[in-house]
Image (cartoon, rainbow, N blue to C red):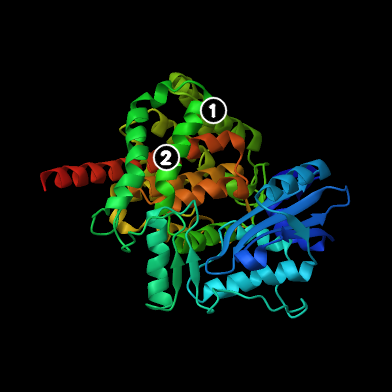
Amino acid sequence: MAKKKKGKVIQMLSPENYIRQKARALPIYECVVNKDWEESGLADIIVARKHTNGNLTVGLFLADLKCLGIKNAHYRFNISQTEYCDLLFNAGETGEMIPIPYPLAHNIVFAGIEFADDYGFVPHQSFSVAQYILEEDTDDIELIEIGCGGEDGKPLYVRGPHEDNVRANQIIAQLEKNAGPGNYNFINELGVDNFDGGGFGDDEGEWGEDECVIFADRINEFLELLPKVDILQGAEEREHFLNLVDSIVEPFVEPEKADRLYGKLLSGFDKIEIVDEPFDEFIGIAPKIESDRDKITEQLDKVLNSSVENVKDLREGLERTMESIPGTPLLHFAELVLLHLEESSGFEDKVESYHKKFPGYPLIKIFWANLRHTKNRQQYSAESIFEEGTNKFFGERAKLHPVEIYQYIQFLALASMGEKNINCLDILSGAIEEIGIKEIFCQQIFSIIAIGKISFVLSLAEKMGKYQEEAGQS
């Protein structure tokens, strides 16, 4: 977000950008860990830094020193001392928390990361931000020996309560590949012994028996609720449905791939300033060209807040403005928004025409790319769009308008939804707040993500039905 003061744009850092850029300058307030971390091999670490106003920014890290490294990471920004006490109280419910010096906390986290990295396990995706609450991992930090792995030094995977058969299969398959058969140990605390490295939703579409048992109840509940989605009463019921969808989808997210794409997406915004005021590159005019910016942006605001019922009136006003200020790319983009809203038969032709007329203008370029991707998904994948990053549309631009960010993220969401790419959909769910998308734009993107996840679950339900039908015939 940006504010204007004395003619200058001043960037207001989001919590995430503040943590990345400034958290390490804050003094360490306290570090704590669960008392039995060495015995259990599972360290629940909290590192707090103090602001000048007395508030705290806090990093929370769950380190599995036996195998997986940083299983979870979170951060809380600029919270009060009361909120911090509540956080400590909740953390202490699972075991006594004790204070430790910062170097020990640091060494526990990075020892877990280093050990897990040898076997291809990467930190939880929120570590990409939370790591900046820790000091940089350099020789300046006292080196402390931290034991990792099981008693024999081999990776010891202890299946956790939130890891169903699908996720456990993925972990064991990775250990088979990177450690080698016989070079790791496994404890299944849930008492389910059938792990075959495949099963539910694998490439061959075959399901293992346990996976069907685990997912059947949730998928059946999903199928029962889906027809009622439009009439679900209250926020709690809607939230329950979406949480149900997420619980079905989560095991199919590939952590390593998702983390890489997540980092790729966020890195594109690291040096970009979000500016609310209309500027030349956003409007599509050359510097110093005289143009009625207020009239242009007024038309855009009306279009972006339009509905099907008032399209005709808006079109007339927009056409008058386009006649008085000809050749303005932003106004042509506004026209495309209206054509799309009213599902005009001439929409595709206009997109092609305006893309030829303004080939380098990002907002029209995004419309055109979305149209091409919708018609021919084989041309490029959603993941390839993430890989290319913001440069694909914005080049080396140093600042973007919120409308540009919204259109870009919406394009990523639509591409991911069309492919039912659960890695990309999951990434966007977590990145929207971090990127700093305006609240008025968020709902549309969240709806696209939800539709993509629902489509994915429907495809799983279809597989489950086929499996059950085949099982009944055998």
User: Which of the two residues, 233 or 185, is positioned nearer the viewer here?
Assistant: 185
Q: Which of marks 2 and 1 is in front?
A: 2
Instruction: Give coordinates of residue 384: x percent, y percent.
Output: 41, 61
User: Which of the two residues, 262 or 205, is positioned nearer the viewer here?
Assistant: 205
Q: Residue 245 carries which label?
A: 2
Callout 2 secondary element: helix
Q: Is residue 137 above or below residue 194?
A: below
30 on left or right of 260: right
Instruction: Give coordinates of residue 446: x percent, y percent.
Output: 49, 39
Q: Is residue 229 above or below residue 352?
A: above
Mark 1 lies on residue: 305
391 on left or right of 210: right
| Amino acid tagged 2 | Val
Callout 1 secondary element: loop
Local packing at callout 1 (Cα closer than 10 Å; few below 14, some 14-19, many 20+) is few
Q: Which mark is residue 332?
A: none
Identified at 54% across, 56% down, the residue is 394
Q: Can residue 301 be seen in this view?
A: yes
Instruction: Give coordinates of residue 145: x percent, y percent.
Output: 69, 79
User: Which of the two residues, 185 or 145, is positioned nearer the viewer here?
Assistant: 185
Instruction: Give coordinates of residue 282: x percent, y percent.
Output: 59, 47
User: Which of the two residues, 359 or 78, is positioned nearer the viewer here?
Assistant: 78
| C-alpha distance separating marks 2 and 1 | 30 Å
Q: In which quarter of the image is the N terminus?
A: top right
Q: Can residue 271 be seen in this view?
A: no
Identified at 41% across, 30% down, the residue is 341
| Amino acid tagged 1 | Asn
